Image (spheres, rainbow, N blue to C red):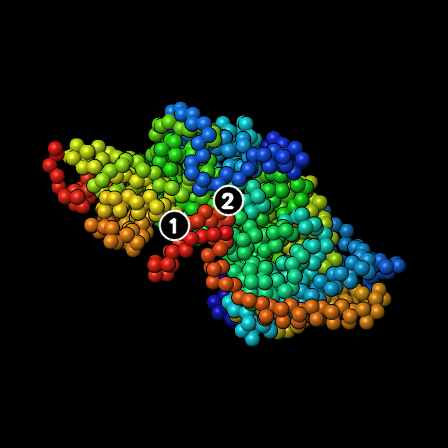
Amino acid sequence: MAAASCTLRSTPLPAAVGSPAARSLLAASTRPVRANQRCLVVKAQKRELMMWEALREGLDEEMERDPTVCLMGEDVGHYGGSYKVSHGLYKKYGDMRLLDTPICENGFMGMGVGAAMTGLRPIVEGMNMGFLLLAFNQISNNCGMLHYTSGGQFKVPMVIRGPGGVGRQLGAEHSQRLESYFQSIPGVQLVACSTAANSKALLKSAIRSDNPIIFFEHVLLYNVKGEVHGPDYCQCLERAELVREGTDVTIFCYSRMRYVVMQAVAELEKQGYNPEVVDLISLKPFDMETISKSIKKTRKAIIVEECMKTGGIGASLSAVIHESLFNELDHEVLRLSSQDVPTSYAYELEAATIVQPEKVVAAVHKVCGVRVAA
Amino acid sequence: MLAAVSSHAAGAARQALGGSLTLAAAGLQRRGLAASAATVEGDTLTVEVNPYKVHRIEAPPTTVTATKDELLSYFKQLYRLRRMEISADMLYKAKAIRGFCHLYDGQEAVIVGLEAALEKSDSIITSYRNHATHVARGGTVAEVIGELMGRTTGASKGKGGSMHMYRREANFFGGQGIVGAQVPLGAGLALAHQYSDTGGVAVAMYGDGAANQGQIFESFNMAALWDLPCIFVCENNHYGMGTAEWRAAKSPAFYTRGDYMPGMKVDGMDVLAVRQAFAYAKQYAVANGPIVLEMDTYRYHGHSMSDPGSTYRTRDEISSIRQQRDPVEHVRKLLLDNGLVEASVIKGIEKDTKKEIDAAIEASKAAPFPDMKELWTNIYAAPLGMQLRGIDSTHVETLAA
């Protein structure tokens, strides 16, 4: 065997897990931090980073804290990640913990599940979420269901992350929204980050969680800048974010649609509207406390999503709202979703496939009535 | 060249493929007259096993030794597993077991030989044909029968069923419903051994049908690339449900399918040959990296209880294997023909085992079914008070561990 292939076997952990020193290291670093504790602010230190840097920082912090955390995927090691999320980390943690896999999603997803069953905390990266369709069986049947089928014996504390969503003319197969397909899988949680701050804080929680978390990033958000918190700040995975407090209507969104909505909101404010904007963050389970509190206040709901019209996150949320908050609504839920078509390469067609700010403005007009600016 | 015949006309298909491509001609090993070639010294038996076929590796010696006590323990386990699977057959026909039920009778020597060579700190994962694996890993027959009958006393509290048995404390990672999907998991178990430098191995078992899955090759590639301590085991019982190996695989030499990876074909009906192979393979895997073992074995039952198992193979074939290569009989003969024990000892073991199985069945029949609240448990390791809505959306269940 070539020398390069032996590097992995001879590269030990910083402290070999299993030795007394390592065991105490593990014990100290894996004090349970439950993701549902209200946001753990120890020292809020804020700096401005791009989302990819924020994710990288969160990853680095968690890998340093817990030697069982590792990342595996295509080009995550030496290349540093196709979106730079693991840039340079292999130099610090070695090839075993930043594992460059061959191109075999079904294989390495299953491998990640097996490793997680033994007590490691792997993060499996899909270079694009769309590629994880090849790993669907492993995600659904093994990652999602092993805790149940084993009668609670095994847990799968892994994070499956990667960018999805519609980019800039990437073509149909690289523009998919897999949250639609994954949402029915029992036993997984779905989280979508949207800002530099929440991407880092949510990723940290996801890594610490004992549940399998499917963590959705977006191809067009990696360079979004924002303030990030310090190493002890973890954000609750099951809580929605109140982006803008308002009174007229609640607009639900997630991931990149948050920015589309806020662009529409800039226009709507000029027109005299006062919308409340809620970033769902938790696509499964929905944060019904925040959702119902908002609807009870505004009595009108618009969902803005990048999923297709058929079977998306919005379809599920719309059903839930109608079923549980019917009497709180003055208007049926309006749902703005992508068209049920493959995403074209052509610029105009691609733009017409997804929700644009004008559509959000029109939807608000529809539920709130047209207003004349004050 | 495909013969234009239905999958049921197995005999015709074999002829169309040119000659009598029966299992015999396909290389199914004949049992050497091992019993007569054995020698005994004190309590230790020395015997020749059938030769190993090798790929990119030296074969281990075919002369093996075993003590009387070892052989007795193997016999007891083999007999126990056999009786357990037979009883599962009866319970299934009595409709006490439903759904899919894949029986292991005929293949017992593989798991017993494996356990004789390996430790409980080594990990193992296998397919849906996993009842025997659970017991071999230290589980009880009652846990298997209980699980098959869907009771709370079952290996997975009645929530997994036949294909989903696990035993965490013995590093038995299941049980798997989807053909071949356990093999990447097995590579992950091996990765974990290397990651944590345990010195142990992971065993990933699959069948001749699964051997053609793409994810098997993905696993081979990763394991070999990183020298993972993984023993891939193809339990070749020659039929992927109703499709014979020569009708599914361009190359049914499964021990060579790892290409760059060494491999060995083993007489899977002989517990001593299997033990030798696993001891050798573990040594190899820990020092060098992955290896493929092909177990030449046979299942008496059909693929599952839904498959009679006689439409694609002849009854003569089944009975001739039973007469010539039965794994339980082989060990019984080694013990009796070489004067290691009196026949009464064997009878005693058989009687006790039957009692054990009967007691397990009675206990399982009396055990409760899972309470309705179990519908909602073990969905998440950390339920966090998540809420799920019921069938008509009016019921809201707050999840607790």
Q: Is residue B177 above or below residue B365?
A: above
- Against B167, residue A354 (above or below) is above
Identified at 23% across, 47% down, the residue is A299
Categorize mark 2 by other alpha carbons within 10 Å: few (<14), some (14-19), many (20+). many
Q: CA distance from mark 2 to mark 1?
A: 18 Å
Q: Residue furthest right?
A: B42
Q: Which amino acid, by three-letter code, is at mark 1?
A: Gln
Give the left or right position of residue B195, taking residue A347 as reference. Answer: right
Q: Secondary structure at mark 1?
A: loop
Q: Residue at x 60, y 37 (%)?
A: A27
Q: Nearer the viewer, mark 2 or mark 1?
A: 2
Q: In the drawing, what numbered circle is on residue A210?
A: 2
Q: Residue A97 occupies which quadrant of the picture?
A: top right
**Residue B9 location (% of width, % of height):** 52, 71
> Which residue position is annotated with label 1?
A183
User: Which residue in the rendered view is the most extreme toward the bottom?
Assistant: B94
* Residue B90 can be seen, yes or no: yes
**Chain identifier of the residue bearing label 2 in the image:** A
**Disc 2 marks which amino acid?**
Asp
Compared with B339, A139 (above or below) is above
